[in-house]
Image (cartoon, helix red, strand yellow):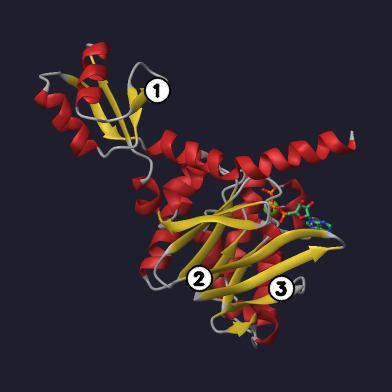
Amino acid sequence: MISVQGLTKTYGGFTAVDNVSFECRPGAVTGFLGPNGAGKSTAMRVMAGLTPATSGSARVGGALYRDIPNPGTQVGVLLDASAQHAGRTGREILTLSALTMGLPMSRVDEMLALVSLTPAESKRRVKNYSLGMRQRLGIANALLGDPKILILDEPANGLDPAGIHWMRILLREYANRGGTVLLSSHLLHEIEVIADEIIVIGHGKIVAQGTKAELLQTAGTFVKAGDASALANALTAAGITAGPSGDGGLRTETDPATVGKAAAAAGVALVELRPAEGAGLEEMFLELTSDTQREAVTAEGATA
Ligand SMILES: Nc1ncnc2c1ncn2[C@@H]1O[C@H](COP(=O)(O)OP(=O)(O)OP(=O)(O)O)[C@@H](O)[C@H]1O
Ligand SMILES: [Mg+2]
């Protein structure tokens, strides 16, 4: 369990994280979604005890990170995968972590195998790693102490599609075993495929939170017919407001079942009828963060 309550972090007069509260439950992958500069890394740094909160608190497994004895065995943290010691090999980094945590050396090889870093790669210096290899090493490091909680900042950064698929399975199985996962991303699609619960942050404030299903529900329906104007008329007749969508179809806030019935009642043959997932969530994301983006533009304009 991760419990963040009224967390605020200011730098001078600037508020990076503004009265943020949320919980991440065991057995679920929680996605922390927000545009660049939203405050995700700052909030995660407070959770991992790397920077003090200005006010409020972040508890991991019921305690403040700094009060946890041997924290690596309770909470696995991956903040900046590129911040690992560049002159050491991957194997050395994991070995040092294992020594610090008092773990058997066999864990190092287990973790290297888990993240698919080959023995040859593990003996290469980290400065010669690709970004994806660094992320894998960082994930291995976070999992080394077999913690019950994972805090991962942009772990999918630099992973190829196969790597993202691998990570999704890894985190899913980890959560199914009762683990708690918080992972951040500025990319909607990554959060959409990996997370069960989503917290959206913009300009330091939480702008939406809920299960993926709840947030997708608000996304409405995409519908398309061979005869577009007949479909538009059928929806209008049924009192459903719809607007044009990118690829020749219509988008509406009404649910798919109601839209399908309206089309059937008017005898309109559909070629597509589905929850407007991808576009809907993207629109929501842009909408939810548009205020903060406007503010940023205005602020820049004012100082220019
Ligand atoms: N040490 C610091 N001093 C001053 N401002 C900071 C500091 N750390 C972060 N900030 C500011 O806080 C805001 C939030 O930054 P943060 O790194 O948390 O964003 P983020 O959501 O992780 O973004 P990204 O997706 O780009 O990683 C930014 O405006 C940033 O400039
Ligand atoms: Mg960040």
Mark closer to the chain start, 2 or 1: 2
Q: Is residue 281 left or right of residue 226?
A: right
Q: What residue is shown with label 3?
A: 96
Question: The residue tagged with tag 1: helix, strand or loop?
Answer: loop
Three-letter code for the amino acid on which mark 3 is drawn? Leu
Mark 1 and mark 3: Cα distance apart in space: 54 Å
Query: Quick check: 173 above or below 301?
Result: below
Specify whether residue 117 is in view.
no
Q: Is residue 121 left or right of residue 225?
A: right
Three-letter code for the amino acid on which mark 1 is drawn? Ser
Q: What residue is shown with label 1?
A: 245
Q: Which mark is residue 23?
A: 2
Q: Residue at (63%, 81%) from the top-left corner?
A: 71
Q: Residue at (49%, 49%) from the top-left corner?
A: 191
Q: Nearer the viewer, residue 132 or 118?
A: 132
Q: Is residue 72 left or right of residue 160?
A: right
